[in-house]
């Protein structure tokens, strides 16, 4: 790669890959944990009726109206919020806001694949610390790295494990820097650490409207933290970052679709447990999940994933995860889709192990 470097390019970027989750089009895509029931109804009505003025004029600077609606949804004052172009933007901006060049980002592993990439993009060092056999972060080892930024994901992607409340509280008390708690799947877990952000000034809770809210294509994420902390994320993020269409539709979803979102999150939880039961009945041992996906240890997961793909179904394989080996991560949706997955899974595993 370095031989291709332009004379004016930063060496730092040689090692930064473009994100490629190998998401080729497929009839039934269960790889990205978005809302497979679709878009909530008021959001969809609002989307279809958007006035042209929303496109021709600038959006609001820092999404003040959306922050008010998010404040009511989360139960914190509006000055505890920052919005972004997806929660990816919050993570990236916050790393830039709090990391000096070379300072350390520590994350439990396995976890969100973008964290080491965001660290590198921002000129920060990265330490991945293997989780314990019970799928909980090894907090002693994480704290021993003395990270400027400690990243924890709860429920964790890709395992689905909820991080114990005592672990999160201790992380916030003892971390030498700021603690990021990624709650992309909070709606499915039914618990949140937003309260921690009210009590401590070194916590940034990161959430998104891409998963339970069914708005991944609009790119709306937000962070919850002490007003001084989120203001610095906002400075790092810059103005006008959330586009006008996204802001208007997200507002409608928060004001009118909360019941739809809660009902469909509950359905996802029911179908997740039903899918886990169906896998157990086949002799597999899916990991306990508090999210809208199931992570199931499967021998030769990459080959099984390819055999699934040949049958028009995609699930995300992970190779050699610590303590559990190869796994498939399967997004949960309406039950007929889960039946379609199970039929393809039976055929695919039979083919691979034959
Ligand atoms: C999906 C996901 C995100 C990204 O969400 P966006 O808001 O769409 O950027 C962040 N963190 C985790 C753990 C995720 O699984």
Image: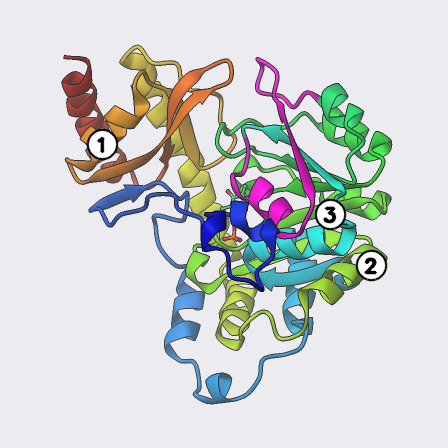
Residue 223: x and y in percent read: 68, 54
Badge 1 marks a residue whose secondary structure is helix
Q: How many marks?
A: 3
| Image vertical order of residue 225 relative to residue 344, above or below | below
- What span is in magenta? 111-138
Q: Residue at x 41, y 38 (%)?
A: 268
Residue tagged 2: 227
The residue at 54%/38% (across/down) is 112
Q: Quadrant of residue 126?
A: top right
Gap in angstroms between the C-alphas marked 1 and 3: 38 Å
How would you rate the neighbour count of disc 3 (Cα within 10 Å): few for under 14, some for 14-19, many for 20 or more?
Answer: many
Q: Which mark is residue 306?
A: 1
Q: Nearer the viewer, mark 2 or mark 1?
A: 1
- In the rendered view, would you say 138 is above or below 338? above
Side (left or right) of 339 relative to 327 = left
Report whether residue 212 is seen: no
Relative to 172, 318 lies left or right: left
Q: Residue at x 81, y 31 (%)?
A: 146
The circle on residue 10 is none
In primary-sequence order, the first of circles 2 and 1 is 2
Q: Secondary structure at mark 3?
A: strand
> Would residue 338 be visible to someone looking at this image?
yes
Q: Earlier in the sequence, mark 2 or mark 3?
A: 3
Label 2 to label 3: alpha-carbon separation = 10 Å
Q: Is mark 1 within 8 Å of ligand 1?
A: no
Marks 1 and 3, the one that precedes in the sequence: 3
Provide the secondary structure element on which disc 2 rests. helix
Label 2 crowd (10 A; few <14 / some 14-19 / many >=20): some
Q: Are marks 2 and 3 in contact (CB under 8 Å)?
A: no
| Disc on res. 204 | 3
């Amino acid at each position: 790669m370095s031989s291709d470097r332009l004379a004016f390019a930063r060496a730092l970027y040689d090692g930064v890959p473009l994100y490629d989750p190998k998401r080729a089009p497929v009839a039934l895509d269960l790889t990205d944990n978005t809302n497979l029931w679709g878009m909530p109804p008021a959001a969809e009505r609002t989307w279809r009726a958007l006035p042209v003025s929303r496109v021709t004029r600038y959006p609001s600077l820092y999404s003040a109206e959306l922050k008010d609606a998010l404040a009511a949804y989360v139960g914190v004052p509006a000055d505890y919020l920052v919005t972004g172009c997806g929660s990816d933007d919050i993570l990236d901006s916050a790393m830039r806001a709090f990391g000096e060049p070379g300072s350390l980002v520590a994350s439990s592993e396995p976890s969100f694949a973008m964290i080491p990439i965001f660290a590198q993009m921002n000129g920060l060092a990265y330490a991945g610390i293997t989780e314990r056999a019970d799928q909980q972060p090894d907090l002693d080892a994480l704290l021993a790295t003395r990270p400027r930024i400690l990243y924890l994901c709860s429920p964790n992607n890709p395992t689905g494990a909820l991080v114990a409340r005592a672990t999160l509280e201790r992380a916030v008390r003892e971390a030498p820097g700021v603690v990021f708690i990624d709650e992309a799947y909070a709606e499915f877990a039914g618990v949140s650490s937003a309260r921690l952000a009210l009590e401590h000034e070194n916590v940034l809770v990161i959430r998104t409207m891409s998963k339970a809210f069914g708005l991944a294509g609009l790119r709306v994420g937000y962070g919850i933290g002490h007003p001084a902390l989120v203001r610095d994320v906002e400075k790092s993020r810059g103005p006008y970052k959330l586009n006008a269409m996204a802001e208007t539709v997200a507002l409608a979803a928060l004001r009118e679709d909360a019941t739809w979102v809660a009902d469909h999150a509950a359905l996802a939880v029911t179908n997740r447990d039903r899918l886990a039961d169906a896998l157990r009945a086949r002799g597999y041992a899916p990991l306990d999940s508090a999210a809208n996906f199931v992570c199931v240890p499967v021998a030769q997961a990459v080959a099984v994933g390819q055999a699934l793909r040949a049958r028009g179904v995609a699930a995300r394989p992970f190779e050699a995860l610590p303590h559990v080996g190869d796994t498939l991560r399967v997004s949960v949706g309406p039950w007929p889709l889960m039946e379609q997955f199970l039929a393809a899974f039976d055929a695919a595993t039979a083919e691979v192990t034959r």
